[in-house]
Amino acid sequence: MTEPREEAPTPHDEAGQALAERVVVLDGKGLRALAHPLRVRLVGLLRQHGPATATQLAGRLSLNSGATSYHLRQLAAAGFVEEDTERGNARERWWRAVHQLTTVEPEIVEAEPEAAQVFLQSVAAAHTLRLQQGLNELATMPRVWGPALNLSDVMLRLTPEQARELGRELWAVLKRYRDEIGQAESDEGRESVAVQFHVLPEPAGVEEGRDA
């Protein structure tokens, strides 16, 4: 599931809060609030790059500021972003993310299947958009980063338990890198790197496994 349950980290973010305190566990209301790919991207950009205005975010997404402003207000009403009053003024609002991670428990997916489906579709659309934007910038990327690009897919025959364990192991690797970054004394030579992975049963396999 999206940003799953590996939520017992110890490193602290730059604001001095434990990362574990900056995790939002979605309920039905949260699922519906994020049921739009643009909102998923806006939250992601604020988490990655820090506070920004609707105009700045619109520029990153090649949209008009009216659209980003509307969705930011909806996200604020749902508690995912908040106004950064230390930066804003009467003419321009700055926004910041309230949390750093989002997790969805299996129980809420079962209880709110329609909202969960729309949310997950929005996450998938946001992942696709990020991938396309990254590939569009490939030509201008510093050459040293070229070999780091990896677009791979692998088909496996797994049980449900093995698929869940695979997801946990992949998250453990990502957590190890994140912890090392948090303990590093210098940020020299580092750039933002998006890592997206999906553990997705094939529809045919799901159909075959269903009870008659």
Image (spheres, rainbow, N blue to C red):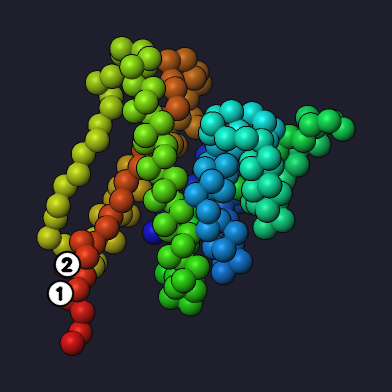
Seen in the image, is 37 located left or right of residue 176? right
Above or below, comparing residue 155 to residue 134 in the picture: below
Where residue 84 sits, quadrant-wise, is top right
Q: Could you tell me residue 171's position as x and y percent?
A: 35, 48
Residue positioned 68% across, 40% down in the render: 66
Instruction: Find numbered disc 2 in the image and state the secondary structure of the residue it sits on.
Output: helix
Quarter occupied by the N terminus: bottom left
Residue at the top extreme of this rendering: 143
- Tell me how far mark 1 sits from mark 2, CA to CA: 6 Å
Q: Which mark is residue 208?
A: 1
Residue positioned 33% across, 17% down in the render: 139
Q: Could you tell me residue 177's position as x and y percent?
A: 38, 35
Seen in the image, is 65 located left or right of residue 196? right
Packing grade of label 1 (10 A; few <14, some 14-19, many >=20) is few
Residue positioned 37% across, 42% down in the render: 128
The residue that mark 2 highlights is 204
Q: Who is closer to the viewer here, 25 or 36? A: 36
Q: Could you tell me residue 90's position as x and y percent?
A: 87, 32
Above or below, comparing residue 189 to residue 32 in the picture: above
Instruction: Find numbered disc 1 in the image and state the secondary structure of the residue it sits on.
Output: helix
